[in-house]
Image: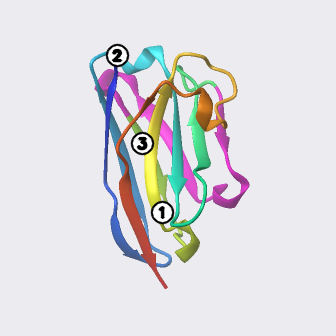
Amino acid sequence: QVQLLESGGGLVQAGGSLRLSCAASGRTLSNYAMGWFRQAPGKEREFVAGITRSAGMIWYVDSVKGRFTISRDNAKNTVYLQMNSLKSEDTAVYYCAAKTAQLLLTTASGYDYWGQGTQVTVSS
């Protein structure tokens, strides 16, 4: 079992930045590909960014390319999501997730473990 705990969310003005962290416990994070997803009220959960075990491949949803950066520190068992130039449409609960397979990172249904989420609110 892997337990994931997100942190770093909060209220920020449009154009500002936040850095989300996802700390893992139970098993070493280096065994898993990782993803960040978000869910806004009344909307389905949306893929934001994904990273393979060794960070050899990274994906982003088009709406965050050039603004968000996913990274990982396997020694610290932590994955990060640096979010810059935030927009009101980025407002959502952000979740990190882990999966053993390194394929189809953009699909939520394939992930094995999920965190409880952290709220990000961007005021315009």
User: Circles 3 and 2: CB distance less than 8 Å?
Assistant: no
Q: Position of residue 95 (x, y in %)?
A: 44, 46
Taking the view exactly as shown, the residue that stands out farthest to the left is 25
- Quarter occupied by residue 24: top left
Task: Where is residue 110? Give x, y as percent.
Answer: 60, 27
Where is residue 55, by image quadrant?
top right
Find numbered disc 2 in the image and state the secondary structure of the residue it sits on.
Answer: loop
Q: Mark 1 belongs to which amino acid?
A: Ala
Q: Which residue is mark 1?
A: 92
Query: Which amino acid does the dot numbered 2 rest on?
Result: Thr
Q: Which residues are magenta?
A: 57-78
Callout 3 amino acid = Tyr
Residue at position x 51%, y 43% in the image: 36
Q: What's the CA distance linking mark 3 and mark 1?
A: 17 Å
- Marks 3 and 2 sit apart, C-alpha to C-alpha, by 16 Å
Q: Is residue 53 above or below residue 48?
A: above
First-in-chain label (3 vs 2)? 2
Q: Residue at x 35, y 54 (%)?
A: 118
Sequence-first tag of 3 and 1: 3
Q: Which residue is mark 3?
A: 80
The residue located at (34%, 17%) in the rendering is: 1
Q: Between marks 2 and 1, how big is the CA–CA gap?
A: 28 Å
User: In the current view of this chain or complex, which residue is farthest to the front?
Assistant: 42
- Secondary structure under badge 1? strand
User: Residue tagged by mark 2?
Assistant: 28
Please, which residue is most extreme toward the bottom here?
124
Label 1 CA crowd tier, 10 Å (few <14, some 14–19, many 20+): many
